[in-house]
Image (tube, rainbow, N blue to C red):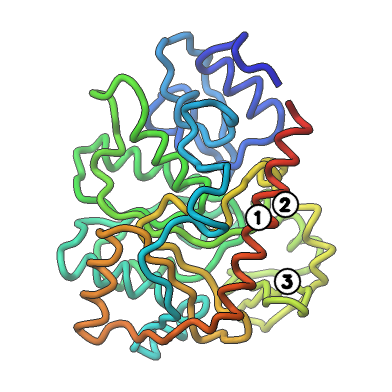
Amino acid sequence: MELQHQEGQAKVIAHVIDAGICVRCGACVGICPYFDCFNGKIVVMERCYAEPSRCAQICPRIAYEPTSPIKNDGAGGEIGEYLKVVMARSSDPGIRNASQYGGTVSTLCAHALEKGFIESAILTDRGEGSRAPGGCVAKDQTEVLSCAGSRYAASGSLSEMNRAVGAGQKNLGVIGLPCQMEAIARMERAEPKESLMAESVVLKIGLFCTWALDSEQLAAFLKEKGVVGPVRKFDIPPPPADEFSVETDKGREVFPLSEVRPLIQKGCAFCQDMTAELADIAVGTVEGREDWNTVLVRTDAGLSLMESAIADGSLEIDELPMDHLNHLKAAAKGKRQRGKQAGARSS
């Protein structure tokens, strides 16, 4: 796929949106008036011919260029560079019950707000009715917990980050998927520097991700299966379960994972990063331990927050068994290899 023949918005439209590989991260929305996010999808409002084009610089699916911040050669190992790896969970049973697994992300986010590490947090809400999940700004623990849990679908939440920065908000924390962490890293490298909107982001908490579902297709799938009412929790248990569960006020429905895989976004095939290598802290599950999270602390900023949350008793930690770490490395290596192969086939 030769990208050099088109520039700016035209490149993003031709090689990402029209090609069907947009991952709906939301990075282009809010910095450009010609993109918008509608019910989980990025739409083009009007054509733009501005140069230099930030949209093309920051899109995580304008790939295989020298500007890409992802270390696609595997530098730093299968799971990227890190300072510390542990199992962690919230010390508060209420937070654990309201969260996906151990409640580590919610705890770190709430602690960062309470202790002044950040002033606001960009999260993904649950969506309402037929509306896809979207970005929201949280200021306290109550607002953080209202967004707890995994969505397994694209959200476009970086659009909310861009709007917050555009409104003058500083000291933001962003919780997002690996593709969203890459988009922020691309913003940090974008030109011209005076237009850089990511300068206000001081904390990045990344979520382990193998793939995300198309939110519109997921809504149609649930409707077809007769799942009604607000979804309280989605879950994909670790192997060998091979299932997708949906919990509502009326109970829990379980579907074979094979029925859900066709809903995976096409653009996820190109991703080489399972463990959010560009975040300050990356968080995922612990195989066979549903009340704990795997935590990779990658930067000094992430380490400072972790140590603070542990010191005041908000967070409990334990050693991650070596076999769990090895399984994680193997899974991350497999995703990197699949992403490279997908990129090679499309070039």
What amino acid does circle 2 point to?
Answer: Ile
Residue at 59% x, 12% y is 4
Say if 88 sits above or below 138 in the image: below
Q: State if disc 2 and disc 3 touch (CB < 8 Å).
A: no
Residue at 25% x, 77% y is 309
Q: Secondary structure at mark 3?
A: strand
Q: Is residue 239 left or right of residue 25?
A: right
Depth check: give the residue in front, 197 or 285. Answer: 285
Q: Position of residue 291 (x, y in %)?
A: 51, 86
Which numbered marker is on residue 244?
3
Mark sitting earlier along the chain (3/1): 1
At label 2, counting other C-alpha atoms closer than 10 Å, the crowd grade (few under 14, some 14-19, many 20 or more) is some
The residue beneath circle 1 is 211
C-alpha distance separating marks 3 and 1 = 13 Å
Mark sitting earlier along the chain (1/2): 1
Q: Is residue 256 left or right of residue 58?
A: right
C-alpha distance separating marks 1 and 2 = 7 Å
Q: Position of residue 292 (x, y in %)?
A: 49, 83
Q: Quadrant of the N terminus?
A: top right
Depth check: give the residue in front, 40 or 76. Answer: 76
Mark sitting earlier along the chain (3/2): 3
What amino acid does circle 1 point to?
Answer: Trp
Which numbered marker is on residue 200?
none
